[in-house]
Image (cartoon, grey):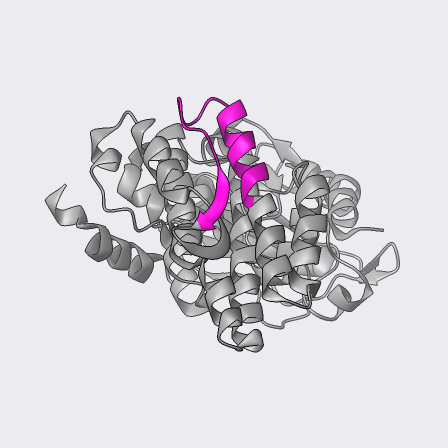
Amino acid sequence: MQGIELSRRFYNDVVRPWLSETAPDLRHAAALSFYGSELLGFDDETSRDHNWGPRVQLFVSPEAFAQHARPLVDAFAVAAPSHFLGEPIGWRSRPHPPADHAGAAGHVAHGLEIHTIESSLETGLGIAGPETLDPLDWLGLSEQKLLAFTAAPLFHDDDGRLGDIRAALAYFPRDVWLYKIACQWRRIAEEQAFVGRAGQVGDDLGSRVIAARLARDVMRMGFLLERRYAPYPKWFGSAFARLPLAKTLAPLLERALLAAGWQARGEALAEAYLVLAQRQIADGIGGECEPVIGPYFERPFATINADDLVAASMGAIADPRLSGLPIIGSLDQVSDATPVLTDTAGSRRMMEALLGGSEQ
């Protein structure tokens, strides 16, 4: 059984009936969020050695939290069974201990946690709510964290508030999305010719490394064009394989990465760029721009007219706050360092400094 289904049944069969007797008037939402391979459906036997198992997070109002949270998690430690469907309900702490801070309460004996939505948004994303976000705020949010908050299904939602917040954070606003597309083409533009140039001087390893970087950029563009958040590296390829675009792109990327020579490597990547560009134009992004594969100026390296695609994507942006930004990118496009992506306050300051947010 996948972890999300185990936790759904744990909530429906154990936690909710117990709540109906112990705190029948407690209005709440129930879900899983922010960590765990089960959020994306990628959990397997290996996942079960750390924090996998019957668990659920309840989300309540600040007033209800102050009155009920800690007494309830303590009482559940006494009332809960030791196992559910053959799995122990005690906390398997690596690397996440049970919740225990302002706005969140848990217990080492079981997988029931109680949170406020406000605390969850602040600690998980560094925001007060989706309504407070301006374009620069969106650019400072990590896709993997947005995905981890919005991906898993809700088990219960009394007033619909958690569902509404998750829907508002489910994907980037259109102009932010267009800016990210433009910046992703800029990343490709910067390095696409280097696959051939490195290979031309006999640096086959360097050519392969650059090709791998560009393959990842193609995959990230696939996520963008499908309007899906990209997960963190462990599940990046697995999630990419689920995208509709992957059916066409994956064979081209495999050809590029397995090619014995730089010419074939660059040509396979160029075919992948063309697939992306044609999809973008078909979706109405780019106006009259015509994607073309050809040599890099007078040099025999297969490339696409990426600069034209950058300009076309930027030209589709309506918000002057975004169309006037330097074409640098969002948090995930300028860093893949885990400490940066997971430091919500620091990443926002970094993006403000890079993009000149204080002057917007």
Image quadrant holding the C terminus, namely top left
Percent x, y of residue 305? 42, 41
Q: In this view, does 229 lie to the left or right of 153?
A: left
263 is within the stretch colored magenta: no
Percent x, y of residue 295? 47, 49
**Among the 4 quarters of the image, the one containing residue 322:** top left
Residue 96 vertical position relative to residue 171 in the rendered view, above or below: below
- The residue drawn where x is 23% and y is 46% is 326
Q: Can residue 36 be spotted in the picture?
A: no
Q: Can residue 315 be spotted in the picture?
A: yes
Name the residue furthest right: 86
Residue 167 vertical position relative to residue 230 in the rendered view, above or below: above
Q: Which of 70 and 242 is in front in this view?
A: 242
Percent x, y of residue 90? 72, 66
Please report the bounds of the magenta region as a residue range: 273-295
- The residue drawn where x is 74% and y is 71% is 49
Residue 262 vertical position relative to residue 131 in the rendered view, above or below: below
Name the residue furthest front: 298
Q: In this view, does 343 lie to the left or right of 37?
A: left
Q: How many numbered discs, if any? A: 0
- The residue drawn where x is 41% and y is 36% is 177
Q: Which of 253 and 34 is in front in this view?
A: 253
Q: In this view, does 231 lie to the left or right of 137?
A: right
Q: Is residue 298 left or right of residue 277?
A: left
Percent x, y of residue 175? 35, 31
- The residue drawn where x is 67% and y is 50% is 252
**Among the 4 quarters of the image, the one containing residue 343:** bottom left
